[in-house]
């Protein structure tokens, strides 16, 4: 079924709807003694755990879910629901497909040079680079095969990383272990590493697996694994951190962003920590400790003296109260709310440190606490772009994440592209996710999800040659020389270049795309696989009012006033030209489906839907 919408009419309706959808007053829940739950780490009473609390739990300890999934948590009770989410290893996830690698890499490409110039220098020096030989000296452009291979490496890794991101996005949508993926996403932001610098999809995949494996384990094992992770070692330049010439990137980010936070160490501590991690390097995809490059001399770090190595430095870091407070505080802000009382942060840090940094213990405390279910914690978190789409798909109950439109591209337009955090500090998050422009763009993105283009109109983004390189290919096909096809200089200089240049960069870029397109596997493309009409009818709704009630119950955590609900009902009735959704109604199933999607688009475009 093809779903079409009238963009102008729907956009106008969305604006009008947002104007008249005020949020209902929220009454603060209190315990039996009348004391508010805010800041209280005591477990919520089982008698206070109902549908709304279970929905909130699944929203934060995952990405939300269908009413049936929420009812399952209600039936388990608070303790059982938290155990189901936190102790997810007991849940079989063998049906999740592993990432299907394209096999774009060959041994000659390792180690991949940092630049085209470096690849060319290696070719001039050794007569070979990136696994290919330089052509004989009397050949035209003798180094061209090396340059072609370099650009192939760049292009193919971008395409493979796009495939990896979509695989991960789909895993978030369909996993039976939502907290595992929610925490993997958290650590991806915390230990931010970008393909822009790593330029190796294999390393990014390895890091993703590492973060997932340690997502809720003890924090020490997680940090140690990340510090030995090839992607992180490359991203923070620790291959250049050697005895007598320490590079401080690794030590600085370990203290500032990964463990202690600003203000809890000195510049001297950074230098000493960096010395301790000298020699920590990688052989492509494997961690390696190079004793010859390690500075094994005496060091003084956070007041402790000795011939300290990386693991000893990490142990000292974990002994500091500031570390427990920093990590507990960051997890709290991710799962509970942005505002954290300093006294409560100290208490959470103490508990985390005394548990041996067991993350599961912290998660159980937070997800069971009265504070977690208090009014300031409920439906007050702005969804990140990734969470926005994943939660939408999970609440719709789809069997797979749609790839038309491309979810990671949509999220990227909203400020969060998986595997491409903006810098080592990760995404700023919180209120920075929403501006007037991005709120409008969120609505546009949801419209493209609910009313996607036909597959034949969409084309295949993994095979779209950028314009400048497409032109090169077209000119070559018409019989132009390489230099003429790449438009370098005038006719006279082109003639000289054909005879003298070692390589043509623009042609290398073109060939890189061509070979990458030949080798990188296509991403299967499909639209949103959901029948909203069947979903609404299955919930017992047969008229416009009942349909709107189900959509609000299913998708919104922020209640609307009667006026807001009435606006949606009127919109749906106008689209249906009726009040009846059943088979006996005047509207065809196709018209009902389009009308419901139009109404759902208004819900998804509203400011209230951005909160979870």
Image (cartoon, rainbow, N blue to C red):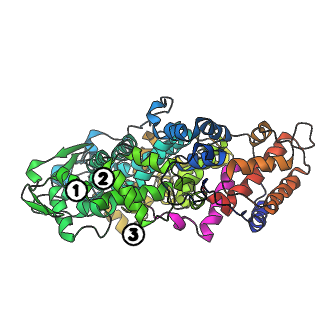
| Residue extent of the magenta highlight | 427-453
Residue at image mark 3: 489
Q: Nearer the viewer, mark 3 or mark 2?
A: 2
Dot placed on the residue nearer the N-terminal end, 3 or 1: 1
Task: Assess disc 1: are there few (<14), some (14-19) or many (≥20) residues with their C-alpha within 10 Å of its C-alpha.
Answer: many
Tell me the residue that label 2 is attached to: 232
Residue 169 vertical placement versus 121 (above, below)? above
Is residue 397 something that shows in the picture?
A: yes
Residue 606 appears in which quarter of the rendering? bottom right
Q: CA distance from mark 3 to mark 1?
A: 42 Å
Q: Are there few (<14), some (14-19), or many (20+) residues within 10 Å of tag 3? A: few
Q: Position of residue 535 (x, y in %)?
A: 74, 39
- Residue at which label 1 appears: 238
Disc 3 is placed on an element classified as: loop
* Cβ atoms under marks 2 and 1 closer than 8 Å: yes
Direction from residue 149 to residue 135 in the image, left or right? left
Compare residues 19 and 408 and report the one nearer the observer.
Answer: 19
């Amino acid at each position: 079924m093809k779903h079409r919408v009238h963009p102008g009419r729907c956009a106008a309706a969305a604006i009008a709807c947002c104007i008249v959808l005020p949020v209902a007053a929220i009454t603060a829940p209190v315990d039996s003694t009348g004391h508010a739950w805010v800041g209280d780490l005591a477990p919520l009473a089982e008698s206070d755990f109902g549908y709304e609390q279970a929905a909130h739990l699944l929203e934060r300890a995952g990405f939300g879910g269908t009413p049936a999934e929420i009812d399952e948590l209600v039936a388990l009770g608070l303790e059982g629901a938290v155990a189901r989410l936190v102790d997810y290893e007991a849940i079989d996830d063998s049906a999740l497909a592993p990432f299907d690698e394209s096999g774009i890499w060959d041994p000659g490409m390792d180690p991949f040079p940092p630049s085209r110039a470096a690849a060319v220098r290696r070719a001039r020096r050794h007569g070979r680079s990136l696994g290919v030989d330089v052509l004989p000296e009397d050949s035209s452009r003798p180094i061209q095969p090396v340059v072609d291979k370099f650009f192939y490496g760049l292009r193919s890794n971008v395409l493979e990383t796009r495939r990896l991101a979509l695989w991960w996005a789909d895993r978030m949508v369909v996993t039976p272990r939502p907290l595992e993926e929610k925490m993997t996403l958290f650590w991806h932001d915390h230990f931010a590493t970008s393909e822009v610098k790593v330029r190796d999809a294999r390393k990014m995949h390895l890091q993703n697996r590492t973060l997932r494996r340690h997502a809720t384990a003890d924090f020490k094992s997680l940090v140690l694994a990340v510090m030995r992770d090839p992607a992180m070692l490359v991203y923070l330049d620790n291959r250049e951190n050697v005895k007598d010439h320490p590079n401080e990137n690794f030590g600085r980010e370990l203290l500032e962003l990964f463990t202690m936070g600003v203000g809890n160490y000195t510049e001297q501590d950074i230098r000493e920590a960096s010395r301790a991690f000298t020699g920590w390097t990688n052989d492509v995809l494997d961690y390696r400790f190079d004793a010859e490059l390690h500075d094994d001399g005496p060091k003084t770090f956070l007041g402790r003296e000795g011939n300290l190595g990386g693991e000893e430095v990490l142990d000292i870091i974990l002994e500091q109260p500031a570390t427990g407070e920093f990590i507990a505080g960051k997890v709290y802000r991710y799962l509970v709310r942005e505002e954290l009382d300093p006294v409560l942060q100290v208490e959470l840090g103490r508990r985390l440190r005394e548990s041996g940094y067991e993350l599961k213990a912290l998660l159980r405390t937070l997800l069971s606490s009265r504070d977690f279910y208090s009014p300031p914690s409920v439906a007050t978190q702005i969804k990140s772009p990734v969470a926005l789409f994943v939660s939408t798909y999970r609440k719709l109950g789809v069997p797979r994440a749609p790839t038309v439109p491309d979810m990671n591209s949509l999220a990227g337009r909203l400020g969060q592209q998986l595997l491409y955090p903006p810098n080592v500090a990760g995404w700023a998050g919180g209120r920075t996710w929403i501006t007037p422009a991005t709120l409008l763009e969120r609505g546009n993105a949801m419209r493209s999800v609910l009313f996607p283009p036909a597959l034949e109109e969409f084309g295949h983004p993994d095979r779209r040659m950028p314009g400048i390189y497409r032109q090169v290919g077209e000119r070559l096909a018409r019989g132009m020389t390489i230099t003429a096809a790449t438009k370098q200089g005038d006719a006279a200089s082109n003639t000289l270049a054909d005879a003298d240049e070692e390589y043509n960069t623009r042609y290398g870029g073109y060939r890189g795309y061509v070979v990458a397109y030949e080798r990188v596997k296509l991403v299967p493309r499909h639209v949103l696989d959901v029948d909203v009409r069947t979903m609404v009818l299955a919930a017992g709704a047969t008229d416009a009012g009942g349909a709107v009630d189900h959509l609000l119950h299913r998708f919104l955590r922020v209640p609307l006033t009667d006026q807001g609900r009435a606006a949606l009902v009127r919109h749906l009735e106008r689209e249906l030209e009726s009040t009846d959704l059943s088979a006996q109604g005047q509207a065809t199933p196709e018209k009902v489906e389009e009308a419901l999607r139009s109404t759902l688009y208004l819900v998804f475009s509203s400011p209230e839907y951005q909160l979870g």
